[in-house]
Amino acid sequence: MKDIQIYKRDDLKQKPLQDHLEFGQIFTDHMFLLDYNLDQGWHDARIVPYGPIVLDPAAMVLHYGQAVFEGMKAFLAKDDQILLFRPNKNMERFNQSNNRLEIPEIDEDFILHAIQTLVNIEKEWIPSGKGTSLYIRPFIIATEPCLGVRAAHNYQLLVILSPVGAYYSEGLEPVKINVESSYARAVRGGLGTAKAAGNYAASIKAQTEAKEAGYSQVLWLDALERKYIEEVGSMNIFFKIDGKVITPELNGSILAGVTRDSIIELLQSWGIPVEERRISMEEVFEAYNNHTLEEVFGTGTAAVISPVGELFWNEKQVLINEGQIGKLSQQLYDTITGIQTGFIPDTLQWTVQV
Ligand code: COI
């Protein structure tokens, strides 16, 4: 394994109070950096004081958006253990995103080792309050100065850390979501399955308009027919209809969420029928009219489980479970967070100790 040079700072920052941690506003004392060039490949692994980086104004990421990222969390768990949740899945997806954007492959074991080393150095930053964690954001940007459109020859991989509370200000209170019928997030064959920065740029206008109308998020429909449900952008989505749980299948434009995968496995292990298939908004609306739409919830690393209390679609309001958190959503939230923090036995061997 390559060495990681460690340059620590003496002037440590003040840690935030834990009771009102917002998502992704505060960053720890150090970060991890790794460079890539054609001669040396990935090289010069180092942990340095957190701070601005120098980029040439012609750096290709600034012009053509060759950038991918991941989202993970470290938990201060039972008996003061530090746990990561299925980090290998994130490393695997990191390389899938790299592949789609023509970014050179990373050594998954080495990057995981680097993340563990960084988290260990920053362990005092892991918050201990309920629902809090240290969010880990690994990302790669194209740094070569060049205005030609092609794969860059130079990259930088960075890992930054942020102590966080709930992703939505609503916490576990059900969120209101606008079903987007005009804009599209991703199309099959595009970047939708990659965790590419551009997917999030594509979502911002609809997100702003939804916020102005009083909704916290946007639910994306398929880009061709605006009919079938895809994902929320910051999370995957599940519907409980008449005792069955349905989530859109991974159709080539949806992100394969690690929490999504974990929820499917959990539901299967509990004997609850779960279907990965195409599901249209018409079907959801019909279930609502028939009183068989029991629960809707989103899943994601940042959001964990986020119950949905209302969907607004084509001028129609779909109220779910009277705007209350559903029994299954609560049970899934308690189980996932219980496993992540070591309070529920990890029989599926999902956690990794730092
Ligand atoms: C995550 O859940 O970690 C994400 O990356 C979603 C979002 C914060 C962009």
Image (tube, rainbow, N blue to C red):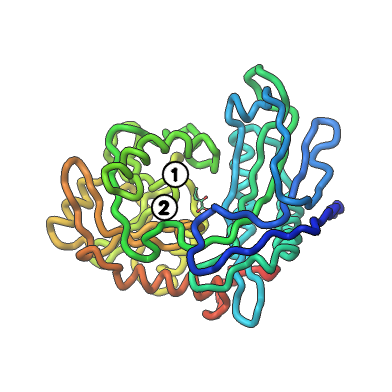
Residue 93 can be seen, yes or no? yes
Instruction: Say few, some or many: other residues with alpha carbon within 10 Å of mark 2 (under 14 / 14 to 19 / 20 or more).
Output: many
Residue 43 picture location, percent across and down? 82, 42
Residue 94 picture location, percent across and down? 62, 46
Instruction: Say few, some or many: other residues with alpha carbon within 10 Å of mark 1 (under 14 / 14 to 19 / 20 or more).
Output: many
Drawn side of residue 292 relative to residue 7, left or right: left
Task: Indicate the quadrant containing the C terminus: top left, top right, bottom left or bottom right.
Answer: bottom right
Q: Is residue 24 above or below residue 77?
A: above
Query: In the image, what residue occupies the spot 54% across and 68% down?
Result: 18
Whether tag 2 and tag 1 are in contact, CB under 8 A, the answer is yes
Residue 22 picture location, percent across and down? 49, 58
Q: Which mark is residue 236?
A: 2
**Corner quadrant of residue 227:** top left
**Corner quadrant of residue 287:** bottom left
Residue 341 picture location, percent across and down? 56, 74
Q: Which mark is residue 91?
A: none
Query: In the image, what residue occupies the spot 72% across and 61% down?
Result: 116
- Extreme residue in the top direction: 148
Total numbered badges shown on the rendered structure: 2
Q: Which mark is residue 254?
A: 1
- CB at disc 2 and ligand 1 closer than 8 Å: no
Query: In the image, what residue occupies the spot 59% across and 45% down?
Result: 69
Amino acid on which disc 1 is placed: Ile
Q: Secondary structure at mark 2?
A: strand
- Extreme residue in the bottom direction: 79
Residue 260 can be seen, yes or no? no
Q: Is residue 94 above or below residue 73?
A: above
Instruction: Give the Cα distance between marks 2 and 1.
Output: 8 Å
Name which of mark 2 and mark 1 comes first in the sequence. 2
Drawn side of residue 310 relative to residue 277, left or right: left
Q: Secondary structure at mark 1?
A: loop
Query: In the image, what residue occupies the spot 38% across and 57% down?
Result: 298
